[in-house]
Amino acid sequence: MSTKQLDSNRLLSDLYRQEHLKMIAVLCSCFGLKHIEVAEDIIGETFLKASENWATASVPEIPAAWLYTVAKNKAKDYLKRNTIFETIIAGDIKPEEGEPEWDFELSSKQIEDSQLAMIFAVCDPSNSKEGQVCLALQVLCGFSVEEIANAFLSKVETIKKRLLRARSKLRESHFQIQVLSEFDIKFRQDSVLKTLYLLFNEGYFSRTSNQLIRNELCAEAIRLTLILTENLLTDTIETKALLALMCYQSSRLEARTNDRGEALLFEEQDQNLWNKDLIEKGNYYLVQAFQGDQVSKYHLEAGIAYWHTNKTAKDKWQHILNLYNQLVLTEYSPITALNRAFAIAKVYGYEKAILETEKLKLDDNDQYHKLLGYLYETIETDKAIDHYSTAVQLTKSKTAKQILLKKIAELIAKS
Amino acid sequence: MLIFRLKDLEDFKPTPEQIHERLNWLAGIAAQNKLADQGNSLLPFVGSAKTVRPDNIVTDGPYTEIKEFLVGYVVVRTETIDEAVEIAKQNPIFKLGGNIEIREVLKHH
Protein backbone atom coordinates (compact mmCIF):
# COMPACT_ATOMS: atom_id res chain seq x y z
CA MET A 1 0.00 0.00 0.00
CA SER A 2 1.35 3.47 -0.85
CA THR A 3 1.83 6.18 1.78
CA LYS A 4 -0.90 8.13 0.08
CA GLN A 5 -3.29 5.24 0.48
CA LEU A 6 -2.27 4.77 4.10
CA ASP A 7 -2.80 8.46 4.82
CA SER A 8 -6.18 8.44 3.18
CA ASN A 9 -7.21 5.30 5.11
CA ARG A 10 -6.11 6.85 8.40
CA LEU A 11 -7.98 10.04 7.56
CA LEU A 12 -11.08 8.07 6.64
CA SER A 13 -11.16 6.04 9.82
CA ASP A 14 -10.73 9.24 11.86
CA LEU A 15 -13.51 10.92 9.91
CA TYR A 16 -15.71 7.90 10.36
CA ARG A 17 -15.47 8.18 14.15
CA GLN A 18 -15.88 11.95 14.12
CA GLU A 19 -18.73 12.26 11.66
CA HIS A 20 -20.65 9.03 12.14
CA LEU A 21 -23.00 10.32 14.82
CA LYS A 22 -23.72 13.54 12.97
CA MET A 23 -24.42 11.71 9.70
CA ILE A 24 -26.62 9.04 11.18
CA ALA A 25 -28.51 11.63 13.25
CA VAL A 26 -29.20 13.82 10.22
CA LEU A 27 -30.23 10.86 8.07
CA CYS A 28 -32.48 9.44 10.79
CA SER A 29 -34.09 12.82 11.29
CA CYS A 30 -35.23 12.50 7.66
CA PHE A 31 -35.99 8.77 7.42
CA GLY A 32 -37.03 8.08 10.99
CA LEU A 33 -35.51 5.47 13.27
CA LYS A 34 -37.61 2.80 11.61
CA HIS A 35 -35.26 2.99 8.63
CA ILE A 36 -32.01 3.26 10.52
CA GLU A 37 -30.57 0.48 8.34
CA VAL A 38 -31.02 2.66 5.24
CA ALA A 39 -29.14 5.45 6.97
CA GLU A 40 -26.34 3.05 7.89
CA ASP A 41 -26.14 1.69 4.33
CA ILE A 42 -25.86 5.19 2.95
CA ILE A 43 -23.05 6.03 5.37
CA GLY A 44 -21.29 2.78 4.47
CA GLU A 45 -21.58 3.45 0.75
CA THR A 46 -20.41 7.04 1.20
CA PHE A 47 -17.24 5.97 2.96
CA LEU A 48 -16.64 3.22 0.42
CA LYS A 49 -16.85 5.77 -2.36
CA ALA A 50 -14.49 8.06 -0.46
CA SER A 51 -11.93 5.30 0.03
CA GLU A 52 -12.01 4.52 -3.71
CA ASN A 53 -11.86 8.13 -4.85
CA TRP A 54 -9.39 9.51 -2.37
CA ALA A 55 -6.88 6.72 -2.86
CA THR A 56 -6.61 7.39 -6.60
CA ALA A 57 -7.53 11.06 -6.98
CA SER A 58 -6.65 13.66 -4.39
CA VAL A 59 -8.33 14.11 -1.04
CA PRO A 60 -10.87 16.96 -1.22
CA GLU A 61 -10.07 20.23 0.47
CA ILE A 62 -12.79 19.86 3.10
CA PRO A 63 -13.19 16.08 3.42
CA ALA A 64 -16.21 16.22 5.77
CA ALA A 65 -18.12 18.50 3.39
CA TRP A 66 -17.38 16.08 0.53
CA LEU A 67 -18.79 13.22 2.61
CA TYR A 68 -21.96 15.15 3.38
CA THR A 69 -22.59 16.02 -0.24
CA VAL A 70 -22.20 12.39 -1.31
CA ALA A 71 -24.39 11.13 1.53
CA LYS A 72 -27.03 13.73 0.77
CA ASN A 73 -27.16 12.73 -2.90
CA LYS A 74 -27.35 9.07 -2.01
CA ALA A 75 -30.20 9.80 0.37
CA LYS A 76 -32.06 11.75 -2.30
CA ASP A 77 -31.54 8.92 -4.80
CA TYR A 78 -32.83 6.44 -2.30
CA LEU A 79 -35.95 8.45 -1.55
CA LYS A 80 -36.62 8.94 -5.27
CA ARG A 81 -36.23 5.23 -6.02
CA ASN A 82 -38.28 4.34 -3.02
CA THR A 83 -41.10 6.71 -3.92
CA ILE A 84 -41.21 5.37 -7.48
CA PHE A 85 -41.15 1.80 -6.18
CA GLU A 86 -43.91 2.43 -3.67
CA THR A 87 -46.12 4.23 -6.19
CA ILE A 88 -45.76 1.42 -8.73
CA ILE A 89 -46.54 -1.26 -6.17
CA ALA A 90 -49.35 0.71 -4.62
CA GLY A 91 -50.60 1.69 -8.08
CA ASP A 92 -51.98 5.01 -7.03
CA ILE A 93 -50.03 7.50 -9.07
CA LYS A 94 -50.75 11.06 -8.23
CA PRO A 95 -49.44 13.07 -11.16
CA GLU A 96 -50.27 16.44 -9.63
CA GLU A 97 -47.88 15.89 -6.82
CA GLY A 98 -44.36 16.89 -7.59
CA GLU A 99 -41.29 15.14 -6.31
CA PRO A 100 -41.26 15.46 -2.54
CA GLU A 101 -38.69 17.92 -1.31
CA TRP A 102 -36.35 16.48 1.25
CA ASP A 103 -34.49 18.93 3.29
CA PHE A 104 -30.98 17.83 4.10
CA GLU A 105 -29.73 21.36 4.48
CA LEU A 106 -29.86 21.46 8.22
CA SER A 107 -28.57 24.33 10.25
CA SER A 108 -25.84 23.61 12.76
CA LYS A 109 -28.43 24.01 15.52
CA GLN A 110 -30.61 21.35 13.87
CA ILE A 111 -27.63 19.05 13.51
CA GLU A 112 -26.82 19.47 17.19
CA ASP A 113 -30.42 18.76 18.14
CA SER A 114 -30.48 15.63 15.99
CA GLN A 115 -27.26 14.37 17.55
CA LEU A 116 -28.63 14.89 21.02
CA ALA A 117 -31.93 13.20 20.12
CA MET A 118 -30.00 10.28 18.68
CA ILE A 119 -28.10 9.83 21.95
CA PHE A 120 -31.36 9.88 23.90
CA ALA A 121 -33.01 7.44 21.47
CA VAL A 122 -30.20 4.93 21.89
CA CYS A 123 -29.99 5.05 25.69
CA ASP A 124 -33.21 3.13 26.26
CA PRO A 125 -33.50 2.01 29.88
CA SER A 126 -35.53 -1.05 28.87
CA ASN A 127 -32.43 -2.53 27.23
CA SER A 128 -29.97 -4.53 29.32
CA LYS A 129 -26.84 -2.67 30.45
CA GLU A 130 -24.75 -4.56 27.93
CA GLY A 131 -27.33 -3.92 25.22
CA GLN A 132 -27.27 -0.19 25.85
CA VAL A 133 -23.49 0.03 25.73
CA CYS A 134 -23.22 -2.11 22.59
CA LEU A 135 -25.89 -0.08 20.83
CA ALA A 136 -24.22 3.19 21.84
CA LEU A 137 -20.90 1.96 20.49
CA GLN A 138 -22.42 0.88 17.22
CA VAL A 139 -24.87 3.68 16.49
CA LEU A 140 -23.30 6.64 18.28
CA CYS A 141 -19.62 5.85 17.91
CA GLY A 142 -19.59 3.93 14.64
CA PHE A 143 -17.89 0.82 16.03
CA SER A 144 -18.14 -2.35 13.98
CA VAL A 145 -19.46 -5.53 15.55
CA GLU A 146 -15.89 -6.91 15.50
CA GLU A 147 -14.53 -3.86 17.29
CA ILE A 148 -17.21 -4.13 19.98
CA ALA A 149 -16.48 -7.85 20.39
CA ASN A 150 -12.77 -7.01 20.82
CA ALA A 151 -13.51 -4.40 23.45
CA PHE A 152 -15.77 -6.75 25.41
CA LEU A 153 -13.58 -9.80 24.83
CA SER A 154 -16.76 -11.50 23.60
CA LYS A 155 -17.64 -13.57 20.59
CA VAL A 156 -18.92 -11.72 17.55
CA GLU A 157 -22.07 -13.87 17.70
CA THR A 158 -22.80 -12.79 21.28
CA ILE A 159 -22.52 -9.12 20.37
CA LYS A 160 -24.71 -9.63 17.31
CA LYS A 161 -27.43 -11.18 19.44
CA ARG A 162 -27.31 -8.33 21.95
CA LEU A 163 -27.49 -5.77 19.17
CA LEU A 164 -30.34 -7.51 17.40
CA ARG A 165 -32.64 -7.09 20.38
CA ALA A 166 -31.58 -3.57 21.18
CA ARG A 167 -31.87 -2.48 17.55
CA SER A 168 -35.36 -3.82 17.09
CA LYS A 169 -36.44 -1.84 20.15
CA LEU A 170 -34.81 1.26 18.74
CA ARG A 171 -36.60 0.87 15.39
CA GLU A 172 -39.95 0.51 17.09
CA SER A 173 -39.44 3.29 19.62
CA HIS A 174 -41.52 6.45 19.46
CA PHE A 175 -38.45 8.61 19.29
CA GLN A 176 -38.35 11.35 16.68
CA ILE A 177 -34.91 12.57 15.77
CA GLN A 178 -35.66 16.25 16.20
CA VAL A 179 -35.63 18.73 19.04
CA LEU A 180 -35.98 16.80 22.28
CA SER A 181 -38.99 17.59 24.37
CA GLU A 182 -38.50 18.49 28.02
CA PHE A 183 -40.47 15.37 28.82
CA ASP A 184 -38.01 13.12 26.97
CA ILE A 185 -35.11 14.79 28.68
CA LYS A 186 -36.65 14.48 32.11
CA PHE A 187 -37.59 10.87 31.49
CA ARG A 188 -34.34 9.68 29.95
CA GLN A 189 -31.53 11.88 31.17
CA ASP A 190 -30.67 9.44 33.98
CA SER A 191 -30.50 6.57 31.58
CA VAL A 192 -28.33 8.55 29.14
CA LEU A 193 -25.85 9.46 31.87
CA LYS A 194 -25.82 5.87 33.09
CA THR A 195 -25.06 4.52 29.60
CA LEU A 196 -22.25 7.02 29.12
CA TYR A 197 -20.92 6.11 32.57
CA LEU A 198 -20.99 2.41 31.65
CA LEU A 199 -19.37 3.11 28.30
CA PHE A 200 -16.59 4.99 30.05
CA ASN A 201 -16.10 2.26 32.64
CA GLU A 202 -16.01 -0.35 29.91
CA GLY A 203 -12.94 1.50 28.69
CA TYR A 204 -11.46 2.34 32.07
CA PHE A 205 -11.89 -1.04 33.74
CA SER A 206 -11.76 -2.85 30.44
CA ARG A 207 -11.54 -6.60 30.19
CA THR A 208 -9.13 -6.13 27.33
CA SER A 209 -5.55 -5.17 28.01
CA ASN A 210 -5.35 -3.37 24.67
CA GLN A 211 -4.57 0.20 25.70
CA LEU A 212 -5.70 1.61 22.36
CA ILE A 213 -9.21 0.22 22.65
CA ARG A 214 -9.43 1.42 26.25
CA ASN A 215 -8.40 4.97 25.39
CA GLU A 216 -10.81 5.01 22.50
CA LEU A 217 -13.80 3.93 24.61
CA CYS A 218 -13.02 6.55 27.25
CA ALA A 219 -12.56 9.24 24.61
CA GLU A 220 -15.88 8.36 22.98
CA ALA A 221 -17.72 8.54 26.32
CA ILE A 222 -16.21 11.98 26.96
CA ARG A 223 -17.09 13.17 23.46
CA LEU A 224 -20.74 12.16 23.92
CA THR A 225 -20.92 13.72 27.39
CA LEU A 226 -19.52 16.96 25.98
CA ILE A 227 -22.41 17.00 23.50
CA LEU A 228 -24.78 16.97 26.49
CA THR A 229 -23.01 20.00 27.97
CA GLU A 230 -23.66 21.97 24.79
CA ASN A 231 -27.42 22.00 25.34
CA LEU A 232 -28.86 24.06 28.20
CA LEU A 233 -31.44 21.43 29.10
CA THR A 234 -29.06 18.49 29.26
CA ASP A 235 -26.15 20.42 30.76
CA THR A 236 -27.23 19.61 34.31
CA ILE A 237 -25.00 19.55 37.35
CA GLU A 238 -25.13 15.75 37.15
CA THR A 239 -23.76 15.86 33.60
CA LYS A 240 -20.96 18.12 34.81
CA ALA A 241 -20.19 15.81 37.70
CA LEU A 242 -20.01 12.84 35.34
CA LEU A 243 -17.72 14.77 33.03
CA ALA A 244 -15.48 15.73 35.95
CA LEU A 245 -15.29 12.06 36.93
CA MET A 246 -14.36 11.06 33.38
CA CYS A 247 -11.64 13.74 33.20
CA TYR A 248 -10.06 12.65 36.49
CA GLN A 249 -10.11 8.98 35.57
CA SER A 250 -8.77 9.65 32.07
CA SER A 251 -5.89 11.65 33.51
CA ARG A 252 -4.57 8.36 34.90
CA LEU A 253 -5.15 6.17 31.85
CA GLU A 254 -1.47 6.16 30.92
CA ALA A 255 -0.27 5.56 34.46
CA ARG A 256 -2.64 2.90 35.66
CA THR A 257 -1.10 -0.06 33.89
CA ASN A 258 2.52 -1.13 33.70
CA ASP A 259 4.22 -2.09 30.44
CA ARG A 260 2.77 -5.59 30.68
CA GLY A 261 -0.75 -4.18 30.82
CA GLU A 262 -1.24 -5.11 34.49
CA ALA A 263 -3.35 -2.76 36.59
CA LEU A 264 -1.45 -0.73 39.20
CA LEU A 265 -2.69 0.68 42.50
CA PHE A 266 -2.62 4.44 42.96
CA GLU A 267 0.42 4.17 45.18
CA GLU A 268 2.32 2.22 42.54
CA GLN A 269 1.60 4.61 39.69
CA ASP A 270 4.17 6.98 38.25
CA GLN A 271 2.42 10.25 39.02
CA ASN A 272 4.47 12.06 36.41
CA LEU A 273 2.39 10.21 33.85
CA TRP A 274 -0.85 11.73 35.15
CA ASN A 275 -2.25 14.16 32.63
CA LYS A 276 -2.30 17.59 34.32
CA ASP A 277 -4.59 19.16 31.69
CA LEU A 278 -7.26 16.58 32.29
CA ILE A 279 -6.99 17.02 36.06
CA GLU A 280 -7.48 20.77 35.54
CA LYS A 281 -10.53 20.09 33.37
CA GLY A 282 -11.84 17.75 36.04
CA ASN A 283 -11.44 20.49 38.65
CA TYR A 284 -13.23 22.94 36.39
CA TYR A 285 -16.27 20.72 35.88
CA LEU A 286 -16.35 19.56 39.51
CA VAL A 287 -16.51 23.14 40.79
CA GLN A 288 -19.39 23.78 38.37
CA ALA A 289 -21.09 20.55 39.40
CA PHE A 290 -21.23 21.71 43.00
CA GLN A 291 -23.14 24.90 42.15
CA GLY A 292 -26.44 23.24 42.99
CA ASP A 293 -27.62 21.59 46.17
CA GLN A 294 -28.18 18.19 44.61
CA VAL A 295 -25.49 15.55 45.05
CA SER A 296 -25.58 12.54 42.73
CA LYS A 297 -23.47 9.44 42.75
CA TYR A 298 -21.40 11.03 39.97
CA HIS A 299 -20.60 13.90 42.35
CA LEU A 300 -19.45 11.44 44.98
CA GLU A 301 -17.36 9.39 42.56
CA ALA A 302 -15.85 12.53 41.05
CA GLY A 303 -15.06 13.70 44.58
CA ILE A 304 -13.25 10.43 45.30
CA ALA A 305 -11.35 10.69 42.03
CA TYR A 306 -10.42 14.27 42.93
CA TRP A 307 -8.89 13.21 46.24
CA HIS A 308 -6.94 10.50 44.47
CA THR A 309 -5.28 13.13 42.27
CA ASN A 310 -4.11 14.83 45.44
CA LYS A 311 -0.85 13.22 46.59
CA THR A 312 -0.18 14.94 49.85
CA ALA A 313 -3.38 16.15 51.53
CA LYS A 314 -3.33 15.16 55.18
CA ASP A 315 -6.93 14.03 55.56
CA LYS A 316 -7.13 12.55 52.07
CA TRP A 317 -8.29 9.10 53.13
CA GLN A 318 -10.74 10.46 55.69
CA HIS A 319 -12.37 12.44 52.88
CA ILE A 320 -12.35 9.43 50.60
CA LEU A 321 -13.93 7.27 53.31
CA ASN A 322 -16.65 9.86 53.89
CA LEU A 323 -17.44 9.93 50.20
CA TYR A 324 -17.54 6.12 50.01
CA ASN A 325 -19.86 6.14 53.02
CA GLN A 326 -22.23 8.45 51.19
CA LEU A 327 -21.85 6.52 47.95
CA VAL A 328 -22.76 3.19 49.50
CA LEU A 329 -25.77 4.88 51.13
CA THR A 330 -26.85 6.27 47.75
CA GLU A 331 -26.48 3.01 45.83
CA TYR A 332 -25.26 -0.34 47.09
CA SER A 333 -22.78 -2.24 44.98
CA PRO A 334 -20.27 -4.88 46.08
CA ILE A 335 -17.39 -2.96 44.54
CA THR A 336 -18.32 0.22 46.45
CA ALA A 337 -18.54 -1.80 49.67
CA LEU A 338 -15.05 -3.22 49.02
CA ASN A 339 -13.54 0.16 48.12
CA ARG A 340 -15.03 1.57 51.31
CA ALA A 341 -13.39 -1.21 53.31
CA PHE A 342 -10.05 -0.32 51.71
CA ALA A 343 -10.53 3.32 52.77
CA ILE A 344 -11.25 2.10 56.31
CA ALA A 345 -7.91 0.30 56.26
CA LYS A 346 -6.21 3.57 55.34
CA VAL A 347 -7.96 5.55 58.08
CA TYR A 348 -8.43 3.09 60.95
CA GLY A 349 -5.88 0.39 60.19
CA TYR A 350 -5.99 -3.10 58.73
CA GLU A 351 -7.46 -4.94 61.75
CA LYS A 352 -10.55 -2.75 61.78
CA ALA A 353 -10.81 -3.06 58.00
CA ILE A 354 -10.70 -6.86 58.23
CA LEU A 355 -13.67 -6.80 60.63
CA GLU A 356 -15.64 -4.55 58.28
CA THR A 357 -14.71 -6.55 55.20
CA GLU A 358 -15.61 -9.91 56.68
CA LYS A 359 -19.10 -8.60 57.47
CA LEU A 360 -19.67 -8.14 53.75
CA LYS A 361 -19.74 -11.91 53.19
CA LEU A 362 -19.10 -11.64 49.45
CA ASP A 363 -17.75 -15.18 49.33
CA ASP A 364 -18.22 -15.59 45.57
CA ASN A 365 -16.45 -12.35 44.73
CA ASP A 366 -12.78 -12.56 43.69
CA GLN A 367 -12.17 -8.92 44.66
CA TYR A 368 -13.44 -9.65 48.17
CA HIS A 369 -10.87 -12.40 48.67
CA LYS A 370 -8.19 -10.30 47.04
CA LEU A 371 -8.83 -7.47 49.51
CA LEU A 372 -8.86 -9.84 52.49
CA GLY A 373 -5.65 -11.41 51.23
CA TYR A 374 -4.08 -7.97 51.04
CA LEU A 375 -5.28 -6.95 54.53
CA TYR A 376 -4.10 -10.21 56.13
CA GLU A 377 -0.64 -10.10 54.50
CA THR A 378 1.10 -8.50 57.48
CA ILE A 379 -1.30 -9.84 60.11
CA GLU A 380 -1.82 -13.53 59.38
CA THR A 381 0.12 -14.89 56.42
CA ASP A 382 -1.74 -18.22 56.29
CA LYS A 383 -5.10 -16.48 55.98
CA ALA A 384 -3.68 -14.16 53.34
CA ILE A 385 -2.55 -17.17 51.28
CA ASP A 386 -5.96 -18.81 51.71
CA HIS A 387 -7.83 -15.77 50.49
CA TYR A 388 -5.47 -15.17 47.58
CA SER A 389 -5.89 -18.82 46.57
CA THR A 390 -9.67 -18.52 46.62
CA ALA A 391 -9.38 -15.36 44.51
CA VAL A 392 -7.29 -17.32 41.97
CA GLN A 393 -10.11 -19.89 41.72
CA LEU A 394 -12.75 -17.20 41.26
CA THR A 395 -11.12 -14.72 38.91
CA LYS A 396 -11.69 -15.02 35.19
CA SER A 397 -8.86 -12.73 34.15
CA LYS A 398 -5.58 -14.39 33.22
CA THR A 399 -3.44 -11.40 34.21
CA ALA A 400 -5.18 -11.16 37.59
CA LYS A 401 -4.53 -14.86 38.14
CA GLN A 402 -0.81 -14.41 37.41
CA ILE A 403 -0.50 -11.45 39.78
CA LEU A 404 -2.26 -13.37 42.56
CA LEU A 405 -0.10 -16.48 42.06
CA LYS A 406 3.00 -14.28 42.25
CA LYS A 407 1.76 -12.82 45.56
CA ILE A 408 1.10 -16.29 46.96
CA ALA A 409 4.59 -17.44 45.98
CA GLU A 410 6.11 -14.37 47.69
CA LEU A 411 4.13 -15.00 50.87
CA ILE A 412 5.11 -18.67 50.98
CA ALA A 413 8.76 -17.74 50.49
CA LYS A 414 8.56 -15.29 53.40
CA SER A 415 6.72 -17.52 55.86
CA MET B 1 -36.58 -1.01 63.04
CA LEU B 2 -33.95 0.46 65.32
CA ILE B 3 -35.31 3.28 67.50
CA PHE B 4 -32.80 5.61 69.13
CA ARG B 5 -33.28 7.34 72.45
CA LEU B 6 -31.13 9.81 74.35
CA LYS B 7 -31.21 11.15 77.90
CA ASP B 8 -29.56 14.53 77.58
CA LEU B 9 -30.75 17.18 75.12
CA GLU B 10 -27.18 18.48 74.81
CA ASP B 11 -26.10 15.19 73.24
CA PHE B 12 -28.37 15.78 70.29
CA LYS B 13 -25.85 18.25 68.85
CA PRO B 14 -23.11 15.90 67.76
CA THR B 15 -19.45 16.79 67.41
CA PRO B 16 -17.81 16.26 63.99
CA GLU B 17 -16.19 13.17 65.45
CA GLN B 18 -19.59 11.76 66.47
CA ILE B 19 -20.98 12.51 63.01
CA HIS B 20 -18.10 10.48 61.50
CA GLU B 21 -18.82 7.57 63.81
CA ARG B 22 -22.52 7.57 63.01
CA LEU B 23 -21.94 7.80 59.27
CA ASN B 24 -19.40 4.97 59.44
CA TRP B 25 -21.90 2.84 61.33
CA LEU B 26 -24.76 3.55 58.92
CA ALA B 27 -22.62 3.06 55.81
CA GLY B 28 -21.35 -0.19 57.31
CA ILE B 29 -24.94 -1.50 57.26
CA ALA B 30 -25.42 -0.27 53.70
CA ALA B 31 -22.14 -1.95 52.68
CA GLN B 32 -23.64 -5.26 53.79
CA ASN B 33 -26.70 -4.42 51.72
CA LYS B 34 -28.82 -4.62 54.86
CA LEU B 35 -30.08 -1.05 55.05
CA ALA B 36 -33.78 -0.91 54.17
CA ASP B 37 -34.38 2.73 55.08
CA GLN B 38 -31.95 5.41 56.23
CA GLY B 39 -34.72 6.67 58.46
CA ASN B 40 -34.69 10.14 60.00
CA SER B 41 -33.41 12.13 62.91
CA LEU B 42 -36.24 13.53 65.01
CA LEU B 43 -35.69 16.99 66.48
CA PRO B 44 -36.38 17.01 70.23
CA PHE B 45 -36.35 20.79 70.73
CA VAL B 46 -39.16 23.06 71.84
CA GLY B 47 -41.13 24.06 68.76
CA SER B 48 -40.13 20.87 66.92
CA ALA B 49 -41.92 18.42 69.20
CA LYS B 50 -45.57 18.37 70.24
CA THR B 51 -47.87 15.77 71.71
CA VAL B 52 -51.61 15.69 71.13
CA ARG B 53 -53.80 14.06 73.78
CA PRO B 54 -57.52 13.41 74.10
CA ASP B 55 -59.69 16.52 74.31
CA ASN B 56 -57.34 18.45 72.03
CA ILE B 57 -54.77 18.93 74.70
CA VAL B 58 -51.48 19.85 73.06
CA THR B 59 -48.24 19.88 74.99
CA ASP B 60 -44.69 20.74 74.03
CA GLY B 61 -42.57 17.69 73.35
CA PRO B 62 -42.74 14.32 75.04
CA TYR B 63 -40.01 15.06 77.57
CA THR B 64 -42.03 16.39 80.46
CA GLU B 65 -43.21 12.92 81.35
CA ILE B 66 -40.30 10.67 80.38
CA LYS B 67 -36.62 10.77 81.09
CA GLU B 68 -35.62 9.56 77.63
CA PHE B 69 -36.68 11.01 74.36
CA LEU B 70 -36.79 9.68 70.81
CA VAL B 71 -34.12 11.05 68.44
CA GLY B 72 -34.43 8.94 65.33
CA TYR B 73 -34.82 5.59 63.63
CA VAL B 74 -33.40 3.48 60.81
CA VAL B 75 -34.75 0.30 59.24
CA VAL B 76 -32.44 -2.66 58.59
CA ARG B 77 -33.05 -5.83 56.60
CA THR B 78 -31.93 -8.96 58.48
CA GLU B 79 -32.80 -12.63 58.68
CA THR B 80 -33.31 -12.59 62.45
CA ILE B 81 -33.84 -10.05 65.20
CA ASP B 82 -30.54 -11.18 66.74
CA GLU B 83 -28.73 -10.05 63.63
CA ALA B 84 -30.37 -6.63 64.06
CA VAL B 85 -29.30 -6.62 67.71
CA GLU B 86 -25.68 -7.25 66.64
CA ILE B 87 -25.86 -4.31 64.25
CA ALA B 88 -27.33 -2.09 66.97
CA LYS B 89 -24.54 -3.01 69.39
CA GLN B 90 -22.00 -1.33 67.11
CA ASN B 91 -23.77 2.05 67.23
CA PRO B 92 -21.90 4.84 69.04
CA ILE B 93 -25.04 6.06 70.88
CA PHE B 94 -24.14 3.96 73.94
CA LYS B 95 -21.14 6.21 74.59
CA LEU B 96 -23.68 8.95 75.33
CA GLY B 97 -25.78 6.78 77.58
CA GLY B 98 -28.48 6.43 74.95
CA ASN B 99 -30.26 3.24 74.02
CA ILE B 100 -31.70 1.46 70.99
CA GLU B 101 -35.01 -0.34 70.87
CA ILE B 102 -35.31 -3.03 68.18
CA ARG B 103 -38.72 -3.86 66.75
CA GLU B 104 -39.72 -6.19 63.97
CA VAL B 105 -41.79 -4.44 61.32
CA LEU B 106 -45.09 -6.14 60.47
CA LYS B 107 -44.98 -7.15 56.82
CA HIS B 108 -48.04 -6.62 54.64
CA HIS B 109 -48.43 -9.32 52.04
Image (cartoon, coloured by chain):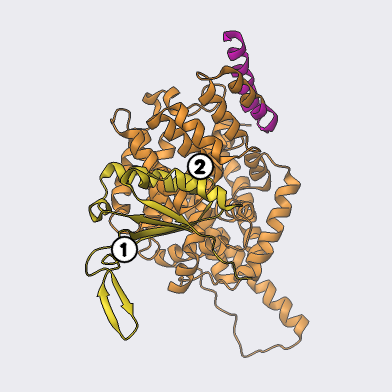
Above or below, A21 against A413 in this view is below
Q: Quadrant of the N terminus of chain A?
A: top right
* Circle 1 residue: B66
The subunit carrying tag 1 is: B
The magenta span reads: A390-415
Which one is closest to the eye, mark 1 or mark 2?
1
Q: Are marks 1 and 2 on the same chain?
A: no
Q: Quadrant of the C terminus of chain A?
A: top right
Q: Main secondary structure of the magenta part?
A: helix
Look at the image and tell me whether residue B28 can be seen.
Answer: yes
Residue type at the position of mark 1: Ile
* Circle 2 residue: A337
Q: Residue A14: x and y, percent? A: 52, 43
Residue A261, magenta (yes or no): no
C-beta proximity under 8 Å, tags 1 and 2: no
Q: Residue sitting at 55 percent across and 34 percent down?
A: A212
| Chain seen in orange | A
Q: Is residue B84 left or right of residue A235?
A: right
Look at the image and tell me whether residue A78 can be seen.
Answer: no
Q: Between residue A268 and residue B33, name the one nearer to us.
A: B33
Residue A248 picture quarter: top left
Residue A129 picture quarter: bottom right
